[in-house]
Amino acid sequence: MATRIAVVGATGNVGRELLNILDERMFPADEVFAVASRRSVGKEVSYGDKTLKCHAIEDFDFSQVDLVLMSAGGAASKEWCPKIAKAGAITIDNSSAWRMDPDVPLVVPECNGEAVLGYEKKMIIANPNCSTAQLVVALKPLHDAVGITRVVCSTYQSVSGAGKDAMDELWNQTRGVFVNDEPTPEIFQKEIAFNVIPQIDVFMDDGFTKEEWKMRVETKKILDESIELVATCVRVPVFVGHSEAVNVELAAPMTAAKAREILRESPGIMLVDDPKEDLYITPKECVGDWATYISRVRKDPTVENGIMFWCVSDNLRKGAALNAVQIAEELLNRGVLKPEKQPVTTN
């Protein structure tokens, strides 16, 4: 029998994208179940040309599946992942609940695919933060080439990273500006329409936000504990697609041309970089794509061995759903899951 999968949080932005990508990449699943909260019971979601009716997580028998793709928030993950493990299924979790647990692998397949084999301790594999996922895909080949000592990253993160209600808030506020009916911010701390907000998640005692902390500690766990990273994370009035301006200090000299050559040949990356022709990628152009796009690669003349670049990716895909499915593909390719047919190749 091929792998049986449950998608938990199937009615949310990421849950729907998980179902789309499972179908798009022809994941060899014998059966797929849509699971959500009790209030979503009976709601229908699309899976390819099929329609799935949602099951309540409280009533669902997880012993009938091999793999769970969980995108229901940290509180639900903390409650349900151990229960799912006792039922015998592996969970790939999209929340922050398990990322820094030393017994749970944190995986971006282009960077540390072999780490999926550490699932056995708790039967959980964590998906990183959306802003971290695209960043480490870009950093990995440069780190492998000469080593990275320090990273400074400024993010320009879309509202979809905060969920469907946040996307609705941007839409309503934008419309309201033109009809003199500006609604009060509810999801974000300040108005997001025609604005940028230098806060994502809560502030910590040191003045950084938790999102900025996540990028630091997750990059260290995925790539190398010796890498120092500092980030400023900003919410921008874009519906889908996260952008990042990245400054990298390398352990040895590297020309911009060599950096482009390395990035061009690396998995998961599309290099679009020709300033003379105004060739670079914006978040609008990355929506619906699998790649992490790199543009504007250049030397940083202010530090020794510095390289700068612009990094853009669809946060609902690589930042969440696609990366989770790629982790599932790693489990297939490494023999943890047993399909009836050959697994697809991970991009």
Image: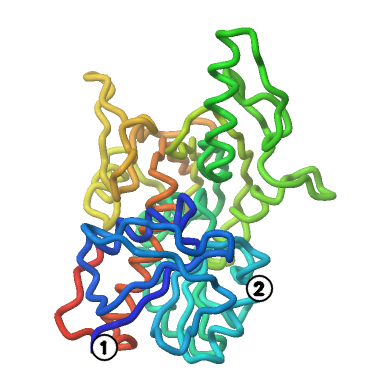
| Residue depicted at 20% across the width and 66% down the height | 26
Q: Is residue 56 left or right of residue 213?
A: left
Q: Residue at x 80, y 49 (%)?
A: 204
Q: Quadrant of the C terminus?
A: bottom left
* Residue 18: image location, x then y, percent: 37, 59
Residue that numbered label 1 is attached to: 338
Q: Above or below — where is 344 with respect to 11?
A: below
Whether residue 238 is visible: yes
Q: How is the image coloured?
A: rainbow
Looking at the image, is 181 positioned above or below residue 115? above
Q: Which quarter of the figure has residue 51?
A: bottom left
Q: Amino acid at mark 1?
A: Lys
Residue 212 position (above or below residue 50): above
Q: Secondary structure at mark 2?
A: helix
Q: Is residue 146 left or right of residue 264?
A: right
Q: Which residue is at 62% across, 79% downward?
A: 102
Of residue 166 and residue 304, the one placed in the foreground of this image is 166
Residue 58 position, x and y percent, is: 59, 76
3 over 12 or under it: above or below: below
Q: Residue 149 sits in which quadrant? A: bottom right
Percent x, y for residue 306?
A: 47, 40
Is 164 or 107 nearer to us in this picture?
Answer: 164
Residue 118: % across, % down: 48, 84
